[in-house]
Amino acid sequence: MFQKARCIYLIKTNSEYQQLKNMSMRLFIVLIVILMLNSCNSDKNTKKANDNGVPERAELSQDSKIFLGNRLFSEKTCITCHAINSKIKGPSVVDIMHVYKQNNADIVVFLKGNSKPIVDTIASQVAIMQANIDGFLKEITDEELDAIATYMLHVDELRNK
Ligand code: HEC
């Protein structure tokens, strides 16, 4: 009689234990699902930020700027008037940089037409470069101008390498 009662008690606790185990398992699964949904949501948020035009690309490294600037300097025809080391139609890049470094001036500001020439101030010469600033230089993006300026700034170091 006593034996039987104990047996029933054991079965009862055993099934309660099973139930408890099932419940905690279910809780665990719900928790994982919530975590997964959350990570999906944050994915969506970054996508949205990109759609809104937030720049995805980091700024170019100095070496990439010099490389790009070097290419643009010939592609955009600067090279036809500016040799690296000797005067042709315009002053040499080395001469330009010498004056700009001495005056702590900014080439990009000049190329955007926001500062006066300081290298060659002879009116006929200034007019030639001014025509470029008013013309094809308007088509060049800020990033490209920055690359050209970085290239010009480091041209003498490149020659010494
Ligand atoms: C058609 C010839 C010609 C082309 C093409 C040309 N330049 Fe010039 N550039 C000149 C002349 C001439 C001067 C001298 C006048 C002067 O200093 O403003 C000059 C001067 C400059 C100066 C010095 C400005 C100063 O403060 O006196 C810079 C910087 C310059 N050019 C950059 C460029 C860049 C960058 C390009 C290409 C995107 C370019 N030039 C294309 C003829 C040219």
Image (cartoon, helix red, strand yellow):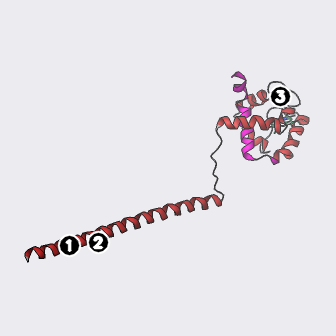
Q: Amino acid at mark 1?
A: Ile
Camera-near label (3 vs 1) is 1
**Percent of width and height locating residue 96:** 78, 30
Residue bearing the label numbered 3: 83
* Residue 107 is one of the magenta-drawn residues: no
Is tag 2's residue or tag 3's residue first in the polypeptide sequence? 2
Identify the secondary structure beneath mark 2: helix
Residue pointed to by mark 2 = 19
Label 1 crowd bin: few (<14), some (14–19), many (20+), radius 10 Å:
few
Q: Nearer the viewer, residue 135 or 116?
A: 135
Please tell me whether residue 89 is drawn above or below residue 18 in the rendered image.
Answer: above
Q: State the extent of the magenta-drawn residues as a range.
A: 139-161
**CB under 8 Å between callouts 2 and 3?**
no
Reading the image, the residue beneath label 1 is: 11
The residue positioned 73% from the left and 29% from the top of the image is 155
Q: Helix, strand or loop at disc 1?
A: helix
Instruction: State ligand 1's quadrant.
Output: top right
